[in-house]
Image: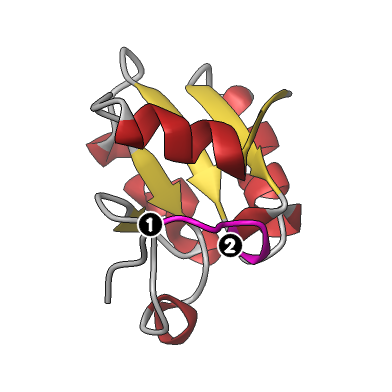
Amino acid sequence: MKRITAHEVEQKLLNGEKLYIIDVREVAEVENGKIPTAINIPLGLIEFKMPDLSKKQKYIIVCRSGARSAQATLFMESYRFDVTNMEGGMMAWEGEIEF
C-alpha cells in the first residue's frame, strides 16, 4: 500500500498541485471540516461509487486516523485503482479546513 503524510499532502496543495482526495469518513464527521477539494464517499459506499471513479486517476484516501482509509486503499487497490493512504488522517492534518 502506498502512503503519504498529511504534511506532504498539504505541501502539494500549497504548491498548486491538483489532487484528487477521497474522504471516507461519515457525513457527520466531514461536517466538522475536510481538506479543501476532497470529496466525501463514506467507507461503506466506496464499493458502490467506484464505477463513478476513473482508474486513470490517482487518488489520496483520507479518514479520521488513517485506519478506515487504509481499508479503503487496500480494497480499491484490489480493483486496480491508483490509491495512496494518507497516514494519520485528519488527526494529523494541520492545513486549511473547508466546512
Q: Which amino acid does label 1 sit on?
A: Ile
Q: How far apart are marks 1 and 2 (CA)?
A: 8 Å
Task: Locate residue 21, reporting x and y percent.
Answer: 38, 42
Q: State the residue in front, 15 or 76.
A: 15
Which residue occupies 38% across, 57% down? 35
Query: Which stretch appears magenta?
Result: 90-95
Residue positioned most to the top? 56
Amino acid at dot 2: Met
Residue found at x 31% / y 25%: 15
Q: Is residue 50 visible?
A: no
User: Would residue 47 be visible to someone looking at this image?
Assistant: yes
Which residue has dot 1 on it?
35
Q: In the rendered image of this protein, does residue 9 appear above or below residue 47?
A: above
The quadrant the N terminus occupies is: top right
Relative placement, left or right, of 19 versus 61 is: left
Q: Where is residue 61 in the image (x, y as percent from the top left)?
A: 52, 43
Q: In which quarter of the image is the C terminus?
A: bottom left
- Which disc number belongs to residue 90? 2
- Mark 1–mark 2 contact, CB under 8 Å? yes
